[in-house]
Amino acid sequence: MEQTSEENAEDDLRRFRQKLSGYEMHELRIMYEHFKKDLVYIVKILNTQSLLAELKSRKALNLEDYESMKRDLGDSAFSEKLVQDVLDAGREAVIKFWECLYSLQTNHPHHNLLAVLSEIQHVEKQQLLDENGHSLDLEIQEVQQKHKEYLLKETQNLKESQPPGTTLESQSFPISERYVDLVVVSTESFRLRTQHELIEIGEKHESCLCKTQRGLERVSPKRLFRWCHQIKGVPNVIMISGVPGVGKTTLMQKFVCDWVNGKLYQRFSFVFFFKFRELNRLKKVSLEEMILHQYPHLNVQLENILKNPEQLLFIFDGLDESCHKMDSASSPLYTNTRDKRDLGVILVNLLRQTLLKGCSVLLTSRPAKVASIDADNFQLICEVMGFFHEERKMYFVQYFGDNALSEQAFGHVRDNEALYTFCYIPSYCWIICKVLSMCFQSPQTNCNRLELLPKTVTQLFVIFISNILTHHSQKAEWEEDHKLLLAVGWLAEYGVMNHVIVFEKRDLISFMVDSSLHLFTSFMMKSSQPSYVNYSFLHLTIQEFMAALVHHVDYAPGKLQQALDKAKSFQDGRAEIFLSFLFGLSDGSTKAPLKGSPLNFSTEASKDVITWLGKLSSLVKKTTKNAQERKETLNIFNYLFESRNKALVSELLGQNLTLDFSRFNLSPLDCTVLAFILKSCQESKCLDLEKCYLESECWERLSPGLHTVHTLRLHLNALKDEDIHFITNPLTHPDCKIQNLSLTNNDLTSLCCPSLASGICGNLSLTSLDLTSNNLTGTHFSILIDVLSSRTCMVKHLVLCAAQLTHDDSQCLVSLSNNPKLEYLNVSHNHITDAGSGHIRDLIEKSSSLKEIRVAANGFSEDVIKKLESLKNSRQDLILLQLPDPSSELLVIDPLACPPAIDPRLGLNLDYAFVPRFRTYCPFPASGFHFTAQAGDTF
């Protein structure tokens, strides 16, 4: 007899338990410590109630105070404490904890949980190899030691360019002192999903699929080359993408430093770390020549080293900075490491594993470049998200050292919404800290900049440059400094337009840049490579800022127009930040800190960029957009945000805007920009953020603009109770325009009801509220119903379908009859049962406003159905949909699988479309009271 899925799951759990039971406590401890960071994160993201209930059922811990503990400690501290408490409780608690996680994966299939449970089956051998490495011949060991010494010298310190206004000497810090963990997530956003995948999975599993996709896997450096449950193996070709300044290079530097120090992946006997900006000088070379060009100390043993490719890791940093073409379709395949090829061809063959089959390859790049290459070459694609709140705070602590000073600086930044958002990018954190250190540490300057903290990226860089000029440019030298600033600016512009970020001496000469001047070192740095000297800006973003600045201070109409058109034509996104700076500098208040410097701004340049921007607004008004068009729309919004010109936003976009970013990845900065656009437009028709899975910080950044939207769709966002106030606060705004609010398919519980209630209380705009597929049962549910029952409540359309309501919850529904505006109520697919049917009957009898109520799939008996049918005898306006014959097809409304639609036969705007295969229904008029019976009823 075939086993049921529940029996199969129980068998799997039994085998999992047996495997764990075979370990002694010291072995379990080693394994637990190996996964500890992962476990802390998993506890943080799992539904706390579900986890604690599972632990309680297995008696893993005494859990009496843990729920209140989370409220007191916060997510992170609570997660760390729970994970540590399990370990401290001993062998049995550890095994039961693992069993709980194994059981929870069915209903909470988050990627990190699935990854850990999959990897634990394969961890022992790999863990030993990563700790001890391979057994090597003595000669190879000696070369490996030389190689590690060389890499340690290159990676152990973070080099920081001179801070403006302090010293001209560059500073250097041990990377372990300054490095803060970056948030890295796995993503499939660069792959194309086949159309038939959902069909293969099956309609019944769609809700499970949604849960699986709801969160991206958090990837620490230690997880990059570990067992991956998606590919059922260990990936060896990985791409890490991220926006400029987000920390990709620093992440790679820390990765290599940890390998050298034996902390990471000793399975790799040799790691080769290359930067594309340094490889650009190479033309046709062999793989061996490429390695020896940077690592000549490997010369004697290189042939032997390459004989074991599975022990090799190649890291290539900054693919977007490469001038070599990388085309998988046209690149010839070859296997000889001594054949001379173009660098792009070498890379393609390493990725395809035709060259050095079995080696591992790790690339970094900007996202736009990743989208232009063949993503199928990569087994794992990750994105560096930068810093979340805790990482930002840690960065300030490590930067300032002094706790009081770091708290003061971080406090100022935290209070500035836009500035704090920019801190997700580490390079901006560095610049912000530089600017604030000037204000805090130089009292003699009586710095008023604290009152004028930058609100845009452009303002941030204006203040940064202003600090440099204030402390390094004397009035007597202004003419010379002015000439240098223009020369550096045109050099930067040439680099942006031609994809050049590393310059040679002849480039400086060509643009008449005098590198001997005192001011030069405040913008550019000199780097000595083994075979040549080059120059680059302190950071790529500074190069992009200087490129934009020069157009405003050395205005040439033809050059500016050409730069705008050329920048817009780039498909790889290389000029997006340059364009943002161009528009940002069009704002007079943004340029104010540079008054009294050697620079004079042209008003004509500002007019030209604003005129050019106006021509792009037609794209924003398109209602249907693909991913690329949505990205372009966000770019335009960012340009407008940088310009700070609210009147221009309103003029270009109007007040009837429909914004659809559903299933699109929005960063905190995107959300800050979007809030600015919404507030500037003052009134927008619709904002659709379905299935965006935004972090709490994103909701926080969006919240100030949400009150301007008529229809707000937030389906399938894994919204938690603690996030709901970001959504309900806009409802309390005196000028709130939200009419339709949909929060379907989220992770809300009854704990969110007080916040929802406070938002709705006194609101005069909200007429439709949809809370389908949340878990609202509980003591706090009545608080929400009390507000919705008020005679002053404006809500006409209320959907509580599949909200896990029970007969206990149904008691408070009766009071909804007091709301004279309520016309439609849907409480289908709950657990009200016969015990609560009397409350539904009372509601129908007492309400004078309800025109339609849906109560299907609540487990009602035949007797209850008849009693509900009998209501039409007491209500003349009650039009009851006739129940279909049990043998016929039934009318079904599926809240999980069907999109919103209008049924033309009824003239009603239904919440969900009818599933086509269930066609039989009994028609009823579009007016009057309707009681709708659906599949799932017990007759």
Image (cartoon, rainbow, N blue to C red):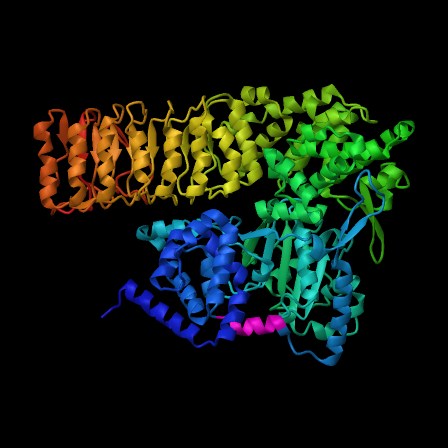
Is the residue 709 above or below the residue 84 in the image?
above
* Residue 302 vs residue 702, the one in the foreground: 702
The answer, for residue 619, to whether it is visible in the render is: no
Location of residue 804 (image quadrant) = top left
Q: Is residue 878 left or right of residue 604?
A: left
Q: Residue at 35% of width from left, 50% of height from top? A: 206
Is the residue 825 above or below the residue 59 in the image?
above
- Quadrant that contains the N terminus: bottom left
Is the residue 23 above or below the residue 859 in the image?
below
**Magenta portion: prevailing SS class:** helix
Magenta stretch, residue numbers: 122-131
Q: Is residue 317 left or right of residue 75?
A: right
Q: Quick check: is 445 in the magenta stretch?
A: no
* Residue 365 vs residue 818, the one in the foreground: 818
Q: Residue at 76% of width from left, 53% of height from top? A: 173
Location of residue 884 (image quadrant) = top left
Picture coordinates of residue 169 (x, y %)?
85, 47
The answer, for residue 107, to whether it is visible in the render is: yes
Q: Quick check: is 127 in the magenta stretch?
A: yes
* Residue 307 vs residue 926, the one in the foreground: 926
Location of residue 797 (image quadrant) = top left
Numbered-mark total: 0
Picture coordinates of residue 530 (x, y %)?
84, 58
Picture coordinates of residue 380 (x, y %)?
54, 57
**Residue found at the far bottom of this picture:** 138
Is the residue 564 above or below the residue 441 in the image?
above
